Structure formats: C-alpha cells, structure tokens
Image (tube, rainbow, N blue to C red):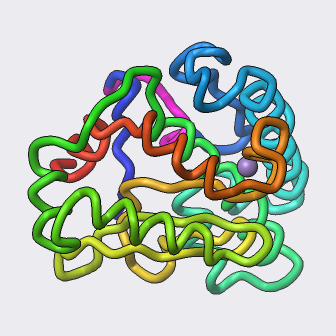
C-alpha cells in the first residue's frame, strides 16, 4: 500500500513519491525565502540543495549495484530494506529514508499561516483533547529526540492519531503507520537561525504547517 499519494503534483506527473532510480531532487513547492521569518532562506537552500541532495546522490550510487531494486519507489525501498542484507539494508534505510523524510517534511510546510481545520481538527480534538494540547505533546516529543531524528504525527492501523519519534533517518513506515506530518529536528534544520534553541524552532514550525495537506492525506 502506498501511503503518500502526492498532494502537490497533478496525477499525471512523476513526483518524489512515485519516482524510482535514477532519483532526482524535486524543487521546493515554494520559494526558498517563502517561509521567512519562521525558517530562513539560507537554511532552506542548504537543507534542500545540499542535505537532501546528498541522500539522493548516495541512494543513486548505492543502487547502481542492485538493479533488482531500481524500479522501486522510496516507500517500496524502505519496505524492501527490512529483508535486505547488509550493506544494502543500512544504505537504503539511511538514504531512501533521508530522501523520503526530507521530501515529506518540505511538502508539509506552507508560506501562509493556517490553523488546523476540517477533518484533521476533529481528529486532533478527539485524540489529543484539543489542537493546543496536540501542539504541547508534539513539542514535547520533538524536544525528547536525543541527537538527530524526527517527530511524526501518524495514523495507526485503528485510525487513531499518534505521535512517534524516529532516530536519524528512520521512518514510521515499517511500523505500519501512515505519516501525516513530520518535523526534522536535526541541528542543520535550525542551527543557523536558532543555534541550539530547538524549542524556538519547533514553535516557529507551528506557524507554517500545511494543514490542508493533512486533510488531503486523511482522504487519500
Ligand atoms: Mn534535514
């Protein structure tokens, strides 16, 4: 089952979630400075053009030697890694995971301030008591990641919202969760603007979440 039907690209277009080897980097769905003042232009340029690009380059290098994996999407690679041998397994989890997590993160942001609404708001109220309380719990989870990783809002197999964290470039896909939102808490995501103040970065993140996309993903 493919979780992430692309929200940003029309159905005929190949996009980050449907592409396979040779993987390429897709442009951000907004300009590099569009998220200012919450995320600065320089951070976005480095994050997209260098950090994400490196995962894509390393994934392509890895897959040269594994033609049987070259037709797989990022999600399919991450699923296939479970039964792959080393060093392929670790290589996929790091690099397909890194590409997936970054594309997913950038798609989840938008330059216009929006409050949770519609289906996602109802589910936040049901499962966390309120959107405000969700923010509190998500912030706590994102702060609890020691070192590098992510906080995710996911849908579990019973249709309940859950907050999970992952280390490094692991995803919640292998646990059977459908990701709805993620936050990159590696220092490269915020150090230029916030130095070591991860809490300030998380607070800024809540101003640029694309809630429309979460509603789209609940229906697809
Ligand atoms: Mn990152």
How many numbered callouts?
0
In the image, residue 128 lies at what x, y percent? 22, 72
* Left or right: 175 in relation to 83: left
Picture layout, residue 155 above or below residue 61: below
Along the line of sight, the residue nearer the viewer: 96 or 179: 179
In the image, residue 102 lies at what x, y percent? 64, 46
Picture layout, residue 104 above or below residue 78: above
Q: Residue 116: which quarter of the image?
A: top left
Along the line of sight, the residue nearer the viewer: 172 or 15: 172
* Left or right: 216 in relation to 42: left
Point 43% across, 36% down: residue = 207
In the image, residue 160 lies at what x, y percent? 20, 76
Q: Residue 169: which quarter of the image?
A: bottom right
* Left or right: 34 in relation to 188: left
Point 80% across, 24% down: residue = 42
Q: Is residue 73 magenta?
A: no
Q: Is residue 14 magenta?
A: yes
- The region drawn magenta spans 11-18
Q: Residue 148: which quarter of the image?
A: bottom right
Point 56% across, 52% down: residue = 202
Point 67% across, 18% down: residue = 32
In the picture, which quadrant includes the N terminus? bottom left
Q: Is residue 142 visible?
A: yes
Along the line of sight, the residue nearer the viewer: 92 or 199: 199
Name the dominant secondary structure of the magenta segment.
loop
């Amino acid at each position: 089952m493919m979780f992430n039907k692309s929200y940003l690209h029309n159905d005929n277009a190949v996009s980050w979630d449907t592409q396979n080897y040779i993987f390429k980097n897709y442009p951000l769905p907004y300009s590099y400075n569009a998220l200012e003042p919450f995320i600065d232009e320089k951070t976005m340029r480095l994050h997209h053009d260098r950090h994400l690009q490196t995962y894509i380059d390393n994934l392509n290098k890895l897959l040269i030697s594994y033609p049987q994996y070259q037709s797989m999407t990022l999600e399919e690679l991450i699923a296939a890694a479970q039964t792959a041998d080393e060093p392929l397994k670790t290589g996929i989890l790091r690099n397909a995971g890194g590409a997936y997590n970054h594309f997913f993160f950038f798609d989840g942001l938008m330059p216009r301030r929006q409050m949770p609404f519609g289906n996602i708001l109802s589910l936040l109220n049901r499962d966390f008591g309120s959107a405000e309380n969700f923010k509190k719990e998500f912030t706590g989870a994102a702060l609890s990641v020691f070192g590098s990783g992510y906080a995710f809002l996911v849908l579990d197999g019973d249709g309940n919202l859950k907050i999970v964290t992952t280390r490094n470039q692991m995803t919640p896909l292998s646990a059977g969760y459908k990701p709805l939102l993620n936050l990159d808490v590696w220092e490269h995501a915020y150090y230029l603007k916030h130095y070591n103040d991860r809490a300030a970065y998380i607070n800024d993140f809540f101003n640029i979440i694309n809630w429309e996309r979460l509603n789209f993903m609940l229906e697809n």
